Amino acid sequence: MEDERIVQLFWQRDESAVACAAEHYGAYLSAVARRILGDRRDAEECLNSTLEAAWRSIPPHRPMQLKLYLAKLTRRISLDLCRKRSAAKRGGGQYDLALEELEECISAGEAPDRQTDRKLLAESIQAFLAALPTEERRVFLLRYWHMYSVGEVAQRCGYSRSKTASMLHRTRLRLKEELLREELL
């Protein structure tokens, strides 16, 4: 079934929309959640929460690309769950490792308080990423947006693990320099 038809089922408040979305994208969404959370049961819980969130948010939203919309919901829900659970214990997902790596560029414990600061930081990071060569941007996004391990990124991109780690390190250093230059750090 095509995305448009599934979205239409959501708009008609037809409960089969949830089953269709789970059938088409469940495995992908579970993989997204598992990379962040590091646990199959947590990923299943996150998938259920994602489908519930989709039911509540469609309508009023009418996503053009349902897979991306659901993946964004999954990522947000997974990160929220990871933050809640990390308060009690340090978890084994890629989220904690990725944050540790990015701490040198962006202070994870001192997020900007004001919405304007967050917006400027986001715009600066987006501009930085847009200026990167395609492969460097792909490696960076696979690691820090999709939360793949360094080994998984290397495998997906056809690089050695050491080349991938080195590329990520250099990119983080350049990001830090850029944010310092713009006085955002």
Image (cartoon, rainbow, N blue to C red):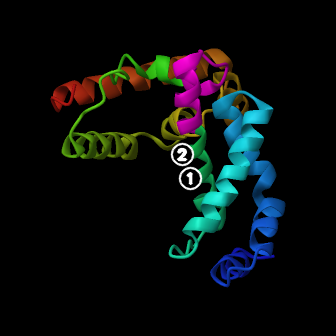
User: In the image, 32: left or right of 116?
Assistant: right
Range of magenta residues: 79-97
Q: Residue at x 71, y 29 (%)?
A: 152
Residue 118 lies, in percent from the top left, at: 27, 41
Could you tell me which quadrant the C terminus lies in?
top left
Residue type of the residue flagged with mark 1: Lys
Residue 142 seen from this side: no
Q: Residue furthest front?
A: 88
Along the horizontal axis of the image, is 105 left or right of 65? Answer: left
Residue 25 image offset from top left, x and y in percent: 76, 58
Corner quadrant of residue 109: top left
**Which residue is at a point 50% across and 35% down the rendered structure image?**
136
Q: Secondary structure at mark 1?
A: helix
Q: Which residue is mark 1?
A: 72
Q: Is 75 above or below relative to 178?
A: below
Is 95 one of the magenta-colored residues? yes
